[in-house]
Image (spheres, coloured by chain):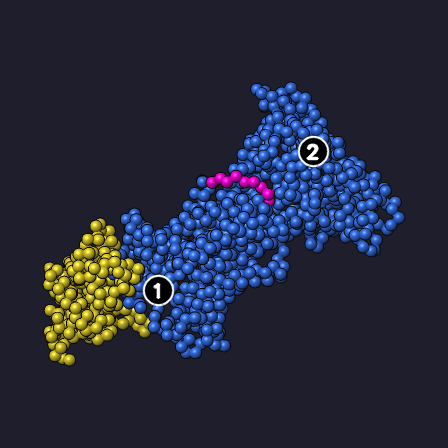
Amino acid sequence: MTGWLLFVRLILRPMRREPIRTALTIFAVALGVGVVIAIDLAGRAAAGSFHSSLETLAGSSDLSISATGGVDEQLLGHLVQLPYAFEFSPRMEDFASINGRGEALPFIGIDLIGQEILRGESRSLPVTAVNPVWVGSRLGLHKGDSVRLLINDSIQAYTVAGVLPDAKNDLGENNAIVTDIGLAQLVTGKQGKLDAIDVSVPTGSVKSWRELLERELPPSVTVEPQGARTEENQKMLAAFRWNLRVLSYIALVVGAFLIYNTISISVVRRRNEIGIVRALGATRAMVANAFLAEAMFFGVTGSLLGLVLGRLMAIGAVRLIGSTVESLYVSSNPAPIQMSPATRLEGLAIGLFVSLLAALAPSLEASHVAPIEAMARGREEYMGRNRSRKLGVLGIAFLAAAAVSAQLPPVARQPIFGYVAVILLIAGTSVLIPNAVIFFAARASSTVRVLLGVEALLALRGLRASLNRTSVLTAALTTAVAMTASVGIMVGSFRETVWLWMDNQLKADLYLRPAGSAAADRHPTMSADIADRIEKLPGIATVDRFRAYPISYEGLPATFAGGETLKHEANARTRFLPGENRDAILRTLATGDYAIVSEPFANKHHIRPGDRLHIPLAGAVRDFRVLGIYYDYSTERGYVIVDRRTLLKYLPDRAVSNLAVYLKPNVDAGQIRREVDDIIGGRAVLVFSNATLRRGAIELFDRTFRITYALEAVAVVVAVMGIAGALLAVVIDRRRDFGLLRFLGAAQPQVRGIILAEAGLLGLLSNLIGLLLGTLLSLILIFVINKQSFGWTIQFHWPVALLLLALTGIYLATVLAGLYPARTAMRLNPIEVVHEA
Amino acid sequence: MPLLELINVSKVYQADGGPVVALENIYFTVNAGDFIALAGRSGCGKSTLLNLCGTMDFPSSGKLLLDGQDTKELDDTALTRLRREKVGFIFQSFQLINTLSAVENVELPLLLARKRQVRAAALERLRWVQLDEYQDRLPHQLSGGQQQRVSIARALVHDPRLILADEPTGNLDTATGDMVVNLLVRAARELNVAVIMATHSAESAALADRMIYLRDGRMEPAREPASLLGAR
């Protein structure tokens, strides 16, 4: 009861007198929690739906049989003759889009007679229907409708034979298109092949049934537990989601600085009252609890608001994350965003934990205020103890530890020590900030006065005087600036690296690919005759055919592909890791079972030149000797590239995924383009010029990192809100000085100028330190975290324009944050405030 | 022309319980070099009157002319300019800015008035109050008397014509208080500055040329400053 009274009288009542500052702190927590929840919800929605739509449609099965390039359907005949009570469900899976536009929809071929779920519908199948399909309810189609579907390079008309029953959880099946397996084989160009055979095993150990099936099947065929691919995809996405999650915590960390600051101010302002209540018998615990209760108040109200914000922000985030997952990793079919009770609890717990943790130090400090000391000192400006020397030593120790940590290897493929280095670097810089403020205030005094006038001088002295408060805020804004700068540098470096890579890699004049929906694991094909006919055109120097297949390698998804390597290298220039002999590699590659692998693949599987890859293909497990590791930035899945002749030896399907066309010098490009269009005829094939392809790639790249920038922006907004709140506190605490200045001849705009100058100096200091810290962080991001998470080599590059724009924006926002506090200062009644003790 | 002229000045504040009359029909003039004591009990309106004289507040009725200018007809900018040129303030609790050194506190009015080469003028005034050796000290490194002397130097640095001192000895011991009052007397005599000093101290008031005695916001009939000593 006493604790509650203390909380109400010592904390709540004064808080009500400063509604704007209270609201800013609550909103800062809300934004921090909101971003974490949004990323969590969106990440789960975007990455949680790798289940084959059919897995859900067809009910549960235990095992799945698959093979690179498809399972020979004759195997099914062999399997059904086995003397065991297996149930086999053959399946084809591809993607279609309605009229060639909009989202990619799962296109599934199944044995209709065997599917319980469709039994009712199949009875009503009109005998005369052309290409009958069953559609998910989300597509809004009705029985009897005619629909044109684009699959690979062809658009055909289909008839809706029925609408699939709604699935409760809608993991993608409510927008699937299902058809008979025979039709699916025909339209996907995989006659005689099956994408998978799902198996329900009789009672007993699934593992022993799996072993039995493996013995019965050729070694090129894989038997995996159902859902294994989903697990593989989740594993592949772990680093991406982990990194995104870490980024989402930045706003919360910045929010924590603000909570610390708010509670510190609260303690300082109430030193007198603390002394009095301690003298009247309040225990230390009571005092500490009152301030922790203040933090709890901010934590709970902020988190509740954060849950609402998070749910709203997740809608935008899921779109951004989904598109990144799709282009870099695997087909994603975002599931609906679901806010479970566990998520709500998580949000509340995070907000509360961070708030209490941030408030712990000032609350304990409050509890150690001696009654006599506080009452004797009276109410005074918070100067804080001079701890700058100790903090300096601590800061340097943190920085040294960060440098050591950055050198350590990953733990379970996660750059744990990289993150530790980031945290230590931020912590080290934060504790060095009081020294930086002292240094800045001492050195810049006269320059500031001469250049910016007396207002700036007073502002600078104000910063120095309230060191504990200003250094915490500078640390908060510095962290936000540094993260923005570091991510900006990393993304800018990555962009530049990709640009240079494209310069070497993309040399063809025209690029062709099927209009069918593509993704990192989806390689729609076009008819081989397109390439053959284009190659014969008189103005064509050469064409380079490329065919890709999704595979699983050592439990992780990858891409196995074949290209006409010599033709490619005659025109483009693949870059290999330092020390590798490019010419020798390329000469050997076309001569047999050799492969080159992309850098992410090599890093993930610890492959070195000379190693052997064991890939199940065409009835046996084939060995490919790795000749070299090349730089590749197209997908994080990782590539294994063989020469096209080697590929066709094992997978003799001549259809191509991509085609690069090189023109002879001085030919009429327009004429060639018209001839190419003639060859394509009515087929759905997209033709890109070199420039268009590059532009598209860079647009995709920029889209990929949009969410990163959004997360940084939220952190900056939180920090700027903190500045606004702190400046309001400055106005209240130094109102006597502002009143006095009016007596000494200061005009109202001059008083406003002091607060704006203080905001400007805070912004300037934070930007300077933030840029320095951001550069160091970017080195860790590029050379440690990125390398250990994704395996990409990125060349360091300063995105000057981007940094200038971002830092100017942050600086202006900081100054603008001072406007309201400045106006408040300007409107103070000097007569009232000047005599306040 | 008198430096300061108050003609039937009244000040009424609106409070919760209705209007409160702080000053009523105040009428007096001040000339350059005058040293006037403003006496009366706490709450009688001394500070209000000083604020009006320093153009920090407006009369509710009547006229206040500072250096011939009717303050009611001036906007905030003009009033600020008038104040920064003509008036210097001294407070009971010194009111120095804690983050500025002694000399920086003194030069502040000049800086606020956008004057250049201010350091020499500030040092000159510090010398005048015999504190030039303490120019780099922060307020908390000075005694109460020294702080008040810095505050006097600050009030004089821009060569004002009127000094308004609100209980300048209230926080000081007698000896130090006497030294402070003597400095104000010297300012009036040597620098030809008019000084209006609110005080509770009979000894301080006795040094004034003239005394204005306030009771409940109204001026009492003129008294000789020395009469306060006798009355005690």
Compare residues A70 and B33 and report the one nearer the observer. A70
Compare residues B37 and A621 and report the one nearer the observer. A621
How far across and how far down the image is residue A814, in percent? Answer: 41, 52
Kind of residue indicated by mark 2: Tyr
Q: Distance between the residues labelled 1 and 2?
A: 74 Å
- Number of numbered discs overlaid on the protein picture: 2
Residue, disc 2: A594
User: Circle 1 marks a residue in which chain?
Assistant: A
At x 83% / y 44%, what residue is drawn? Answer: A216
Res. A547 visible in picture:
no
Q: Is residue A119 shown above or below A531?
A: below
In the rendered structure, the colour chosen for chain B is yellow
Q: Residues in magenta?
A: A790-798
In the rendered structure, the colour chosen for chain A is blue
| Quarter of the figure that contains the C terminus of chain A | bottom left
Q: Is residue A735 shown above or below A116?
A: below
The image quadrant that residue A504 belongs to is: top right
Q: Is residue A135 shown above or below A282?
A: above
How far across and how far down the image is residue B123, in percent? Answer: 19, 56
Q: Is residue A792 covered in magenta?
A: yes
